[in-house]
Amino acid sequence: MKKPLFVAALLAASASAQAAWVTTDLGEGVFPNLTGVNGTVIGGRDMADRWAAFRTTPAGVQNLPLTDTGYSRPTAINGLGHITGYAYKTSGKGYGFLYRDGVVTELSLGGDYVYAPLVNNAGLVAGAGLLPDNTDMHAFTYNRGTLTTLPISGPELEVTGLNASGQILGHGIPVGNGSHTFLYSDGTVTDLGTVPGYTHSVATAINDAGQVAGWAGMDTWYPLRAFRYSGGVLTDLGTLGGPTSGALAINGKGHVVGLADTGQAYLFHAFCTMAKKWWTWARWAAI
């Protein structure tokens, strides 16, 4: 049977695209977790005596030049190739790090643990760590040689988002019997609250417009409820018929993607919200 013209064109485009890709073997014991816009891969590498953070270069896989470190893990890479992550000294003391232009800067608030998960294209680093008393986690930024502790803390505080304008997203600020999501912008901390009827909220993503995605939960966490925060309003996104849903990411247009169960023996479907509508993956693929 003669193929329709558009099918032939599609197959030709597919063949052309396949020819442009090259698979590279990064070696044994290499576990990549992110790639930058220029194709640089970062991840962890099993070195027998330690777990080492690495990046790829034209010469191959290269460990980051961290000293006296038994474990290290990169967590983010920006468009300029700057890498952030966390590590532990051989003594067990933790620290965050920024790798930039061949130089490693160690980041610490004085306590035993620091997590520096994010860096934007302006070079701003955001994370959280313990002060010398090793009690609550405190949010911080690092920018052009200055490490600043922010007025945000909690025993389980995490920083989970950083956008191009320097807005910082996280969760874990104690509120009553629960903990809430927060947004730090221009020196102001905003408690984003939670879905009515729930005690906790967890932030998963922020876009450059400051819109946020996440989920709400109870003390036992389950069931969960996906939400979107935009323009000062936190909106319950509902479910697909089952008791639980969770938002995982949000794009520049405010479209949210995540997972929700349908009520059928905990059968989870992927979803995308667009123009206040829910789309399951099967329905999305059909349009």
Image (cartoon, helix red, strand yellow):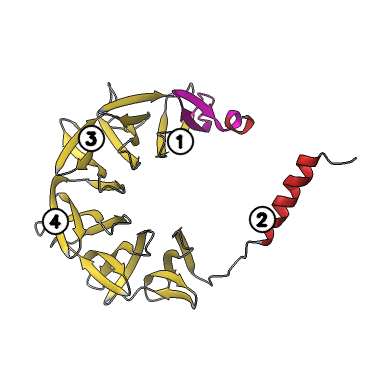
Residue 225 picture location, percent across and down: 37, 28
Left or right of 103: which side holds 223? Answer: right
Q: Residues within 10 Å of mark 3 (few under 14, many from 20)?
A: many
Q: Which image quarter is the N terminus in? A: top right
Please name the amino acid that badge 3 sits on: His
Q: Determine which residue is flagged by label 2.
A: 17
Q: What element does badge 3 sit on?
A: strand
Q: Earlier in the sequence, mark 1 or mark 2?
A: 2
Mark sitting earlier along the chain (3/4): 4
Three-letter code, disc 2: Ala
Q: Earlier in the sequence, mark 1 or mark 3?
A: 3
Q: Residue at x 22, y 46 (%)?
A: 157
Please state the extent of the stretch shown in magenta in the rendering.
261-283
Tell us which disc is closer to us: 1 or 2.
2
**Mark 1 to mark 2: distance in Å?**
27 Å
Whether residue 214 appears in this view of the structure is yes
Q: Sequence order check: which comes first, mark 1 or mark 4?
A: 4
Q: Which mark is residue 257?
A: 1
Relative placement, left or right, of 224 versus 263 is: left
Front residue (pair 253, 174)? 253
Q: Is residue 131 above or below residue 103?
A: above
Label 2 or label 4, whichever lies nearer to me, is: 2
> How far apart are the two marked residues, 3 and 4, measured between alpha carbons?
22 Å
Q: Are marks 3 and 4 in contact (CB under 8 Å)?
A: no
Residue that label 3 marks: 180
Callout 1–callout 4 Cβ contact below 8 Å = no
Residue at 15% from the left image edge and 62% from the top image edge:
146
Disc on the earlier residue, 2 or 3: 2
Which quadrant of the structure image shows residue 8? top right
Q: Residues within 10 Å of mark 4 (few under 14, many from 20)?
A: few
Instruction: Name the residue carrying label 4.
Output: 148
